[in-house]
Amino acid sequence: MNTVPIGVLVILLVGLILLSGFFSGSETALMSLNRYRLRHQAKQGHRGAIRTAKLLERPDRLISLILLGNNFVNILASAIATVIALRLMGEAGIAVATGLLTLVILVFAEVTPKTLATLRTEQIAYLASAVYQPLMKAVYPLVLATNWMSGQILKLFKVDKESTEVEALSSDELRTVLNETTGMIPPRNRDMLVNILDLSTVSVNDIMVPRNEITGLDIEDSWDEVKQQISESRHSRMLVFKENIDEVQGFIYLRKMFDSLHTGDYTRETLEKNIREPYFIPEGTTLTVQLLNFQREKRRIGLVVDEYGDIQGLITIEDIVEEIVGEFDTDPYHGPEEVQAQGDGSFIAEGSAQIRALNKALEWDLSADGPKTLNGIVLEHFENFPPQGAVFTFNGHPMTVLEVEENFVRRVRIDPKVETIDDEAESS
């Protein structure tokens, strides 16, 4: 090498530094690729994605190939730099060459290409795969030998590289991914996808119509009263019971009764014949499971019961669908919202408003492990039935009891959150 002109050695050194930068940058790009996007593009027939995905099937071999190439060019560059330094400055040039080469490699072969790789991940990875694919075939035996030796060393530390788990996302991680796809997925669609993930964390108890609000048809009433209830009902299905809800008989689909009205067969016997047996749902059932149960049982409505078989509430398939797409009102007789915003920034909430409704309307993060409704929150605070006008603070919000009827808090006013000293200190 002493006979090679210095100019040629400098050109070789620059080329080796550029090669080192290629190996370093491509390693970062290949290891930083979004695997899910890569698989999608590969399925779409993108040649670069297909080639890259095949290389990444065995990342240990790919890393061995990259490191073999990178270390080879770095060592060769170090040798050439030493020769140049010796010929120009003698023994003193070795220290100078070491310091300069370290700085040059750090800037031009490490930091700069790796930074570029994080900004142009796909372009660099797909370009590099075109180089690594034939290179892998050329030095395949050397890669296998390197991997074998590495594997033996790992075994000494009782690490089995073959036992690595398949990369997967948990529901919480997938929820984070969806929330960060701003601009890529319309907000409405993103919210629906997130709501689907949340179904597994919500139980039927959280969205059911509570027992005291269930309206039904007492089959023991006079026929005129029964017909009036049917004609005035704002539901498509009605619960049928004898005397009280604990003596439930089943559900009646009002469409069938209206069909009977047109055929002239509108009698109590027809009503009893069209009653479908009740469908019971154990409390605590998640919405994901219940949606599948509704589908399997070909049902659209069911009664939630506790461990003693007592009826706790009622839930329909529409209630679950609303948890996904949001509330919709196709019923002209639908009552007012449970939580209504006021012009002064406060809210008027029904005592029956459930925790999930409060969380959505007020952007709270209350756990569903405690009280299920606003009425439960009030009663838990006072440990008794409060008088009308009673005031207390919950979750930083002053609350005023507006209406109490018998043993139930009907309406509560929720004022904006009060800024505490701690809050003001944090904001400042």
Image: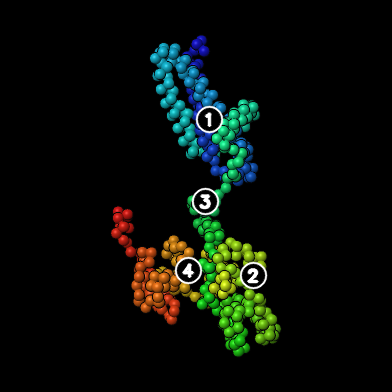
* Left or right, 83 with reference to 250: left
Residue bearing the label numbered 2: 299
- Dot 4 falls on a residue whose secondary structure is loop
Residue 23 is marked as: 1
Tags 3 and 1 touching, CB below 8 Å: no
Q: Is residue 7 above or below residue 164?
A: above
Question: Which element carries disc 3, helix, strand or loop?
Answer: helix
Cβ atoms under marks 1 and 4 closer than 8 Å: no
* Secondary structure state at the residue bearing disc 2: loop
Give the percent coordinates (x, y) of residue 180: 49, 51
- Residue 367 x %, y %: 46, 62
How many marks overall? 4
Which residue is under mark 4? 372
**Percent from the top left, x then y, of residue 357?**
47, 67
Residue 330 in view, yes or no: no
The amino acid sitting under disc 1 is: Phe
Location of residue 249 by image quarter:
bottom right
Residue kind at label 4, given as amino acid type: Lys
In the image, which disc is placed on residue 173?
A: 3
